[in-house]
Image (cartoon, helix red, strand yellow):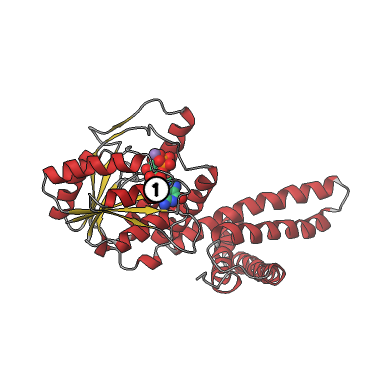
Amino acid sequence: MLSIVVPTYCEADNIPRLAERLNDVLSAEQITYELIISDDNSPDTTNDVVLALSSKLPARLLQPVGRDKDLSLSVIDGIKAAMHDLVVVMDADLSHPPEMVPQMFKALQQNSEAFVVGSRYVPGGSFDRDWSLFRFLNSYVATLITKPLVSCQDPMSGFFGLNRTKIADYDRLNPLGYKIGLELMVRGKFEHIIELPIRFVDREIGESKLDLGQQLKFLRHLRRLYTAKFGTLGEFFSYGLVGASGFIVDLVFYYLLQFLGAPHQIARALSFWPAVSWNWLLNRIATFGDRERRPHGKQWLEFVLASLLGFSINWGVYYVLTTYVSFFDQYRLVALVTGVGVASVFNFVMSSLYVYNEKRK
Ligand code: GDD
Ligand code: MN
């Protein structure tokens, strides 16, 4: 027994075509199913269309109350509302061939530990080639960045199936934007991913609902998934990158101020401030972007204090090593790098535990 979840927004023209093709293939295979149209209160005739369908097919309409329109949340709502544990999610616009659904269902029945994906990029899969170069590059690059997260050739696919009991808590999912399949793959407890080749057909009726805003959200979504998967290591890496960019800011101001006539000691003392502020802001937005937002001024001050303390440690390590260990006195650059390393770990720990400590709920 299968539940099919189809998120929709203004797909009144496509829904009956999809429902009928699904019914044909599923009846032929004698698969009992229900079709859930998870619709974001479309202003078109979706309500009437689904009502009419429901008198002859096992279809029903699900609509949210009191939340913004959101593709990922519609998919989650649909999965939660399903009568059966085996669920297939697909688009309404017939891009995803209904004829593949029985195969996905059987794959799920045979491997309850698997996440099944209708994939364009495995042998046998395909998509209409009249994609613009931008759309192609976009999809290609996005797929590339997900490689460390999942081993799936088509992680962006909106056509997938799962045993919904493999997701421990749907309220703890944290999708941003529309890549709910990727979210489920990364956060679910699936033993493997089965990719079934599909021919992805461009929609005939209506147009794509996904815009640039969604794409930007996708970047933030990726950062979340990286943090979820690699935890502190991912954060430390980001912190290091921010620090490196701050060093450039430091140098720019150091030279700029001297160019403007400041003595070099003064330039050195002043260039610290733009650099430390830059680091504070970027860490707030990027590295610890998921932490609770705290008042700017107070947090900035704490970050500065932590950095000053870090710098004392940096200098202290250098001083002790070069004074007491002759090796380091010979290779002072090694002492300097060691100081920077120790101080970076110290700064990171201070930032993570104090400056940006509050986890966002
Ligand atoms: N409930 C709800 N809310 N449904 C939505 C929303 C929304 O805000 N936005 C879009 N949908 C529905 C559409 O009605 C359609 O059934 C499905 O989600 C996919 O939307 P399209 O507008 O057809 O997206 P696309 O063709 O650009 O993207 C498809 O291909 C991508 C890969 O190239 C989707 O399958 C994506 O998931 C997939 O990543
Ligand atoms: Mn589409």
Q: Which residue is drawn at 62% across and 51% down?
A: 245
Q: Residue at x 87, y 52 (%)?
A: 262
Q: Position of residue 131 (x, y in %)?
A: 42, 28
Q: Which of 326 and 10 is in front in this view?
A: 10
Label 1 beta carbon within 8 A of ligand 1: no
Q: Which of 333 and 153 is in front in this view?
A: 153
**Compared with residue 202, is residue 275 higher up or lower down, i.e. above or below?**
below
Secondary structure state at the residue bearing disc 1: helix
Q: Is residue 115 left or right of residue 214?
A: left
Q: In this view, does 257 lie to the left or right of 106?
A: right
Q: In which quarter of the image is the N terminus?
A: bottom left
Q: Which residue is drawn at 73% across and 59% down?
A: 272
Determine which residue is flagged by label 1: 46
Q: Where is residue 331 in the image (x, y as percent from the top left)?
A: 58, 55
Quarter of the image where one finds residue 75: bottom left
Q: Nearer the viewer, residue 238 or 111?
A: 111
Identify which amino acid the numbered label 1 is placed on: Thr
Q: Position of residue 282 (x, y in %)?
A: 62, 57
> Is any atom of residue 25 visible in this view?
yes
> Is any atom of residue 336 visible in this view?
no
Extreme residue in the right direction? 261
Q: In this view, does 124 lie to the left or right of 259?
A: left
